């Protein structure tokens, strides 16, 4: 089965066109995922003229690959965040994430968006053969930040009667693309223009004017918000504070009512989760996810899906046929909060990145924060998400995550994965050595060879083949490239260098 998410059939902003020529507006928003579209919405509601521009289809990035939990507590555990950020900052972080969910609830109500939004309970349950003390530590930390939490024994999953559990009330979930299609429609009705298939190649600022340059046109604006999932304006510093992880989701049909509608996730590291999404007639979809690994460091998706399925079948009775499987990437930050606010390189350029596994709430909180900054207002969340912050207590995470870059550059000295291009089978990709160079080689089903440099165009790390997604992944900061070398995920802007066959 090829990679396709449960949400991808929805067309967001179907009238979007390619940017061709010069455009002007108050704010150019680069990137049309939840961060970009939510920012456009907040700004146009307050009277700004806004243009949204995207490299591909509107909302075709990581937002179309999410699993759509709307959970306000720190995804990496509140107890862990408190150790690094302290009590006050952690409380403000959780409050901001909760406010983002309130805002989604409000917007879908105001704009009458039919997107399956609902409030429900979340259950963190003790992983199989895991100690229970993590549950107690987490309960104490969550209570300290003032969020509601209840300690239980057992959860409504098969064989989990004896597990230690925390119940969090007032979590939420929705259909992310139905929601964003509605928000984009409201934006269009308020004068926002959407451009698709228009990769931005440069963002510059001169005398208070920001220029956003694409292949066939440019936008002049008073402000730009860079919402490209991973920044294309700050080219280096911010990326040393994030690390890309690939994560997997598989969905099955299930009879409605088989398990209570709630969010469930375990205490394993990386954790697994299960949740429901309404389907047709009397059927629901069960989403099961996890099995994360650092991007580019494994190419064994089938085994990971097998493990997810086995985990789900051990906990949920009556799982029906598989309907979808897909993977995507999250950008973990070293201190668990995103980087949102004024970009270090520009007065009128703002950034929103670093989802830490909760990019939906980060996207919406970021839209609220960056909108205030565009209006020159102060905001209580500014320091929590300050892009230039140096989190000294996260030094250990900084070192651990940045070792990847050293390992990646060392790979240039290693032999190729195959000795000769003749060894490359149909539909396969591999890195090949040619003299001092490493080449990214892919042979398509018709036998044609697609050959590019294996050096990422962001800052040069060594790429790895991803056979499930049929693309090249960069382990350093999360860029991805298609088999012809075109970037399909930021921060890379330029294509992989051509090489002669
Ligand atoms: C499998 C999975 C499960 C997840 N589960 C959850 C969850 O349960 N809850 C949660 O809160 N979060 C979750 N996340 C994270 C969350 O979905 C993402 O972090 C979030 O959707 C990212 O939104 P975004 O707007 O920042 O980025 P994107 O949706 O990736 O949007 C960025 C856009 O920028 C565009 N772009 C990039 N470069 C350029 C350029 N040069 N020019 C023009 N456009 C450009 C891209 O084409 C893209 O459309 C999950 C992620 C994955 C992959
Ligand atoms: S993403 Fe930074 S080097 Fe590849």
Image (spheres, rainbow, N blue to C red):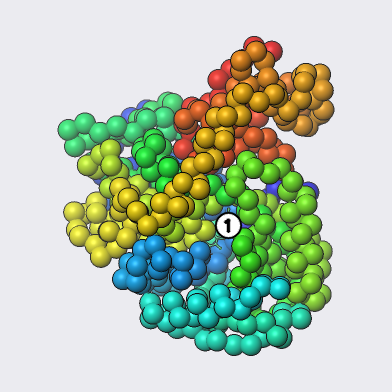
Task: Tell me the quadrant of the picture where the C terminus can be found.
Answer: top right
Residue 354 position in % (x across, y down): 44, 51
Residue 82: which quarter of the image?
bottom left
Q: Is 276 placed above or below 231 here?
A: below
Q: Secondary structure at mark 1?
A: loop
Q: Residue at x 46, y 46 (%)?
A: 399
Nearest the camera: 407 or 101? 407
- Disc 1 crowd, CA 10 A, few/some/many (<14, 14-19, 20+): many
Residue 187 seen? no
Q: Which residue is mark 1?
A: 66
Residue 337: which quarter of the image?
bottom left
Q: Is 60 left, or right, of 318 in this rendering?
A: left
Q: Is 434 left, or right, of 84 in this rendering?
A: right
Residue 81: which quarter of the image?
bottom left
> Does label 1 point to a residue whose CB lies under 8 Å from ligand 1?
yes
How many circles with numbers are drawn on the protein?
1
Residue 163 position in % (x across, y down): 67, 82
Q: Residue at x 61, y 62 (%)?
A: 269
Residue 3 position in % (x across, y down): 70, 48
Residue 426 seen? yes
């Amino acid at each position: 089965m090829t990679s396709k998410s449960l949400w991808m059939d929805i067309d967001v902003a179907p009238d979007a066109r390619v940017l061709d020529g010069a455009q002007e507006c108050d704010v150019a928003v680069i990137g049309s995922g939840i961060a970009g579209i939510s920012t456009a919405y907040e700004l146009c509601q307050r009277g700004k003229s806004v243009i949204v521009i995207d490299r591909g289809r509107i909302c075709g990035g990581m937002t179309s690959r999410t699993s759509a939990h709307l959970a306000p507590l720190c995804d990496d555990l509140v107890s862990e965040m408190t150790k690094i950020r302290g009590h006050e900052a952690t409380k403000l972080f959780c409050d901001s994430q909760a406010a983002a969910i309130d805002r989604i609830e409000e917007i879908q109500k105001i704009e009458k968006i039919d997107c399956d939004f609902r409030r429900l309970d979340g259950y963190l349950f003790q992983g199989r053969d895991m100690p229970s003390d993590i549950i107690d530590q987490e309960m104490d930390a969550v209570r300290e930040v003032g969020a509601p939490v209840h300690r239980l024994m057992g959860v409504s999953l098969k064989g989990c009667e004896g597990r230690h559990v925390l119940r969090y009330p007032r979590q939420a979930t929705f259909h992310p693309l139905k929601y964003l299609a509605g928000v984009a429609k409201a934006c269009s009705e308020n004068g926002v223009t959407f451009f698709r298939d228009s990769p931005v190649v440069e963002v510059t600022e001169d005398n208070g004017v920001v220029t956003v340059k694409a292949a066939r046109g440019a936008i002049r604006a008073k402000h730009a918000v860079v919402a490209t999932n991973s920044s294309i304006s700050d080219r280096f510093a911010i990326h040393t504070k994030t690390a890309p992880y690939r994560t997997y989701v598989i969905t099955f049909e299930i009879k409605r009512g088989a398990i209570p509608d709630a969010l469930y996730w375990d205490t394993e590291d990386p954790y697994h989760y299960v949740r429901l999404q309404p389907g047709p007639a009397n059927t629901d979809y069960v989403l099961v996810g996890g099995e994360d690994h650092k991007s580019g460091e494994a190419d064994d998706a089938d085994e990971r899906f097998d493990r997810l399925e086995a985990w789900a079948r051990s906990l949920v009775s009556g799982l029906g046929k598989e309907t979808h499987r897909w993977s995507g990437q999250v950008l973990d930050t070293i201190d668990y909060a995103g980087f949102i606010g004024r970009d270090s390189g520009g007065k009128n350029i703002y950034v929103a990145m670093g989802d830490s596994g909760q990019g939906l709430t980060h996207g919406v909180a970021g839209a609220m924060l960056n909108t205030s900054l565009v209006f020159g207002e102060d905001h209580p969340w500014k320091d929590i998400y300050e892009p230039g912050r140096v989190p000294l207590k996260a030094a250990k995470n900084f070192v651990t995550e940045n070792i990847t870059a050293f390992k990646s550059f060392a790979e240039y000295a290693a032999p190729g994965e195959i000795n000769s291009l003749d060894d490359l089978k149909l539909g396969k990709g591999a890195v090949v050595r040619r003299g001092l160079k490493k080449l990214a080689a892919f042979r398509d089903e018709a036998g044609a060879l697609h050959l590019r440099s294996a050096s990422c165009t962001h800052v040069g790390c060594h790429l790895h083949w991803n056979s499930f997604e049929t693309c090249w992944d960069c382990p350093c900061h999360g860029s991805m490239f298609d088999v012809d070398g075109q970037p399909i995920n930021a921060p890379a802007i330029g294509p992989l260098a051509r090489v002669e066959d």
